[in-house]
Image: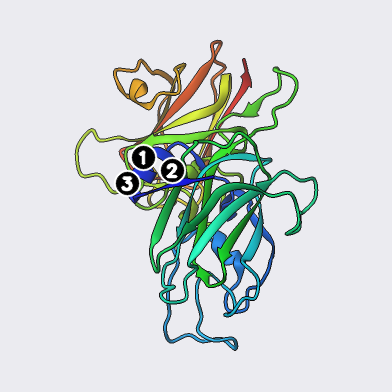
Amino acid sequence: MSVNVVDLSEFDTSIRSRFTDVIGSKLGGRVESCSDEFFAEAANLLAPKMPIRDKTRYTYQGAWYDGWETRRHNPEETDWVIIKVGVASARIIGCEIDTAFFDGNQAPAISVEGVFAETVPGPDAEWETVISKTDCLPTQRQFFVRKDGLSEEYYNYVRLSMYPDGGIARFRLYGTPVPVFPTSLSTVIDLAHVSNGGVAISCSDERFGTVDNLLLPGRGIDMSDGWETTRSRHAGYEDWVVVKLGARGKVSKVVIDTAFFRGNFPDKIRLEAIDAANDVSALEADAKWTVVVPNHKASPDLEHEFEVNLDYPVSHVKLFSIPDGGIKRLRVYATRV
């Protein structure tokens, strides 16, 4: 599948704000196998933090790199790594390849393929092209978007190949999770959860922690995997994030978790909701949001639970951190309509 190469600003606007990194280790993505990882482990590709470099550090194999690096002189066409998607399955729109600090030993080109399989597939599986072979540059982030848009097929395993060998620091693969909803519409589920199709589509700020963290499973490991904003300096300021739910639903309970935020949690929290089309511009243009959870004094390191019992469906929620601060998770429990 041919791709467009785009810059960071365009990728953030058109891809990262609308889709999910479906292979991230925070979501449960994991490396299953690879052709080679002599110099640096393939699992580093999925690490949530930005890559680093320590030129004074060496291992038995050679210079230490924070990424995936294979031997030289690969006799095969490619080196490859097979990755389990972190959700049940996903349709794919684009990817980020970061060759940070790989300068002269970077992967010259990459491709991405996918398959849906009941067991871990091998290199001889019936792989389908998701991102066609594309050249890579040294020591920089590169963003590739499918020209045909979101893939028609959905996959639970992907294979990243590099031609013929070399190093890649990070790999992000964006798409839409294909949720497996309960058969009964009366079942209450978390419609904000990323595995159920929830996605954060816009926000006021994410200086210290990104908004996609709000929708991850579990309560995280520390402040690094939550949403945290810049300290505000203006009276009346409010930080916010808009979340598109995985399906329209009638909300019965909301949980706003400030786990690990002990001196930088919000002073107050609020949640609003709306039933609207999936159009960010329409939502921001005089949208009539309904207050679901009114301004509530927040506490540190706590799951704040609110029984709301809406008798009408909503498609989006808007979480406020007042005036700023850090929030770990947002749960929106509802029945689908």
The three-letter code of the residue at mark 1 reads Thr
Location of residue 69 in the rendering, given as x and y in whole percent from the top left corner: 55, 73
Residue 328 visible (yes or no) = no
The three-letter code of the residue at mark 2 reads Arg
The three-letter code of the residue at mark 3 reads Ser
Location of residue 260 in the rendering, given as x and y in whole percent from the top left corner: 49, 52
User: Which residue has dot 2 on it?
Assistant: 16
Q: Is residue 226 left or right of residue 331?
A: left
| Viewer-nearest residue: 34 or 270 | 34
- The residue carrying pointer 3 sits among few (fewer than 14), some (14 to 19) or many (20 or more) residues within 10 Å by Cα, namely few
| Viewer-nearest residue: 323 or 225 | 225
| Vertical comparison of 139 with 303: above or below | below
User: Which residue has dot 3 on it?
Assistant: 9
Please give the name of the residue rendered at 70% of the width and 32% of the height, measured from the top-left corner. Answer: 180
Evaluate if marks 3 and 1 touch, with contact meaning CB atoms under 8 Å apart. yes
| Viewer-nearest residue: 59 or 76 | 76
Q: Tag 2 or tag 3, which sits nearer the N-term?
A: 3
Q: Secondary structure at mark 1?
A: helix
Q: Seen from this angle, which residue lies furthest top?
A: 311
Q: CA distance from mark 1 to mark 2?
A: 7 Å
Residue 13 badge: 1
Location of residue 171 in the rendering, given as x and y in whole percent from the top left corner: 52, 58
Evaluate if marks 1 and 2 touch, with contact meaning CB atoms under 8 Å apart. yes
Location of residue 312 in the rendering, given as x and y in whole percent from the top left corner: 54, 11
Q: How did the renderer colour the structure?
A: rainbow
